[in-house]
Amino acid sequence: MSEGAANLASAISGADGAVVLALRVQPGAKRSQLMGLHGDRLRVAVASPPVDGKANRALVIWIAKLLGLRRSEVALISGAASRDKRVCCDASRSEIEAALTRALI
C-alpha cells in the first residue's frame, strides 16, 4: 500500500454499508473540491458559506455526487458546527476508496 493510500485509509472507517469519512471542511471556498489530506482527515473545500447549515447541506450533496451515491445514502453524523466532521455513506468501502483515490489524482 502506498503512503497516499495508507493516509487515505486513515480517513475512512467502518464497514460496507456504514462507511464513515473523517473530514476537515473549509466552507466559503471558491469551488467545492477535495483538497487532499489534513492529518488523518480528508480536506474538503465547500463553496457554500457556513450560514444556517448551508455548507453542511452542500457538503452532503457534493460527497454524494463525488462518490456516485444518492443524497439519501450520505449523512452528516457529527460536526454540524465544526470544521471537523464525520459523514456516513451507505456504500462499500472499496467503492468509496476507489472514488476518493480517483478524485485525489
Image (tube, rainbow, N blue to C red):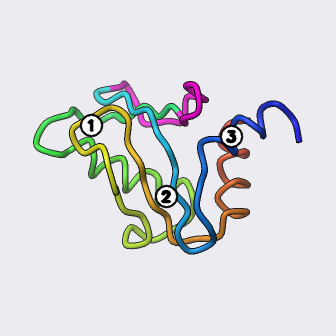
In the displayed structure, does residue 6 sit left or right of residue 15? right
Q: Position of residue 53 (x, y in %)?
A: 17, 46
- Which one is nearer the viewer's eye here, 50 or 41? 41
Instruction: Name the residue type under label 3.
Output: Leu
The mark found on residue 65 in the picture is 2
Is 104 contained in the magenta span?
A: no
Q: Give the image location of residue 63, x and y in percent.
A: 47, 53
Circle 1 residue: 48
Q: State which tag comes first along the sequence, 2 or 1.
A: 1
Q: Secondary structure at mark 2?
A: helix
Q: Look at label 2 and name its amino acid.
A: Lys
For the point 38% across and 35% down, which residue is it? 84
Seen in the picture, residue 57 relative to 3 is either above or below; the reply is below
**CA separation, marks 2 and 3?**
19 Å
Residue at 77% in and 32% down? 4
Among the two numbered marks 1 and 3 on one chain, the one whose residue lies closer to the N terminus: 3
Q: Residue at x 58, y 71 (%)?
A: 91
Residue 1: mark in rendering: none
Residue 72 placement (x, y as % from top left) = 37, 72
* Separation (CA) of disc 1 from disc 3: 25 Å
**Which segment did they paint magenta?**
29-42
Q: Which mark is residue 8?
A: 3
